[in-house]
Amino acid sequence: MKTKRIMLAAAAAAACGCTGADKAPEKPNIIYLMFDDLGYGDLGCYGQTKIETPNIDALASHGILFTDMYSAAPLSAPSRCCIMTGRHMGHSQIRNNQEHFEPTDGRGWNTLFLDDTMEGQLPMLADTPTIAKMMQDAGYKTAMVGKWGLGFPDSDSTPNKMGFDYFYGFNCQALAHCYYPTHLWENGTKIATGNETVMQGEPLPEGLDPMDPASYDRYGGKYYSCDLMYDKLEKFITDNASGPFFAMWTTTVPHSAVQAPKDEVMHYVDKLGDEEPITDGGMYLPSRYPHATYAAMVTHIDTQVGKLVAKLKELGVWDNTIFIVTSDNGPAHNGNSPMEYFQSGGPFSCAAGWGKSSLHEGGIRMPFVVAWGDRLKGTKSSHIGYFADLMPTFADLAGVEAPENDGISFAPILKGEKGQQEHEYLYWEFPGAKGWVAVRIGEWKGLLQKANKGNQNMELYNIVSDPRETTDLASEHPEIVKRMWEVVRDSHEAPVYDIEKFKTKINYPAITE
């Protein structure tokens, strides 16, 4: 493939009369910052008023703020698999979260905090074409810093085997639930952090004062993972400033459990006021100030965004670096994630069952900000797209051919060119939470809930006039519902892993026959 591309490039150069002395267009560096469970409404540029995100807001003010960009899935691993492969959930290898181990002590994934030799998730297949391998072929140095969650340490699906020259962070998304981990991975080596083991899923011990912040010190540590990872990210970019480089910064913020440096938490306690503690964090951790800590976590990463922009400018590569900020899926609903307090869904409902793990807008409509130095001048785009589009977009920007994918490049929007192609439809399915299917066609969204229970009643919403999905119009527009079912029929195929957690059981009604 590389040889073919070189020959094609040489032929193109000859056809246009270019010579070896002509300078080829400079390939842009790409930094892809993906939050974990950040809601559409958690950033100031999308309407948040309680959480401070001045640096990301600044990117939006002179970049492009996308209003209709979607995740590929409402959960971590399948969303990340789509980014890596460019395949939507009807074609994806990974369609749900699935640990590669089987716990036997009744503690579920908390077993990992006692025995980390079982860490990791179900892997992608060996030799899967990925966005990182594509960027390597295009001459980029590639790195992922943050959370992986698409394999286990000894599998064929680790970051280094899937196209990243450098990796530092969490191999296992379950172990990423602690922000003071005992270890992280640097490429294929487990690196001790110096932190002690912090067990999840246990309430505050009796005898400790729940109103005393010191009672919660037992859940912290000395080395905050976000800072350990940021330092490695900045070093990779500094070392590869001659470019081009492609860096995926997959922060674990603000996924539960909520933890942040004390002084940053107290800033928000002063701002938001005192609050009731969470003494039983369910499967996560107790917290004295859950609201303040959630806000502090988001602002912590925003501060690092500001530092990284300053570093890019210092290195002289700011103007040729594309900086993307988004989230893997919508906000979670648990004691550690106060999504309703912050109205994390923005214009979309963020009640239980309407965010993460659902195909409602709050579960899959993402904040999506793109800055490219000072070139984009601060605009909004209502272009409808999703994570499958990243692979063809980056291929266009890098000047290479993308592997087979389900996306459409939005590079013309970034380049200010006319003729941006639009999706005929977007498709989602999710086998969790009793099974979900969704289709978006223009202003219309079809939604099927409880698919795995045999439900065939597709709901229909005008997602422009009714973004909170309150009025089902299916009975008024049977012809649109029929088209939705045709898309479902054409988009779904059996998963490569024959396991129940990956199967969306779709029963097609007679309307498609």
Image: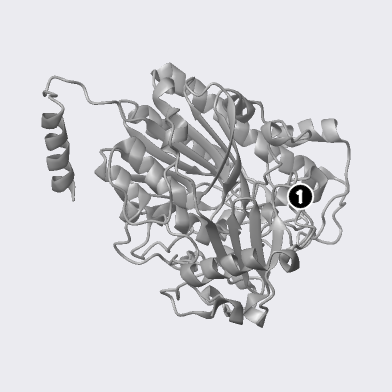
Give the residue at x 50% y 59%. 172
- Residue at image point 30% right, 38% down: 140
Q: Does residue 316 lie above or below 513 as drawn?
A: above
Q: Is residue 491 above or below residue 65?
A: below
Which corner quadrant of the image does residue 111 belong to? Answer: bottom right
Position of residue 321 in the picture relative to residue 156 (left or right) = right
The x, y position of residue 376, in whole percent, is 50, 24
The percent coordinates of residue 395 (x first, y second) are: 34, 42
Drawn side of residue 119 relative to residue 454, left or right: left
Q: Position of residue 61 (x, y in %)?
A: 61, 24
Q: Nearer the viewer, residue 155 or 424?
A: 424
In which quadrant is the C terminus drawn? bottom right
Q: Is residue 338 at least partly visible in the picture?
A: no
Q: Name the foreground residue: 82 vs 222.
A: 82
Residue at the spot of label 1: 339
Corner quadrant of residue 10: top left
Q: Amino acid at mark 1?
A: Met
Q: Front-most of 264 and 438?
A: 438
Residue 36, compared with residue 411, is above or below; it is below
Residue at position x 72%, y 37% from top?
A: 262
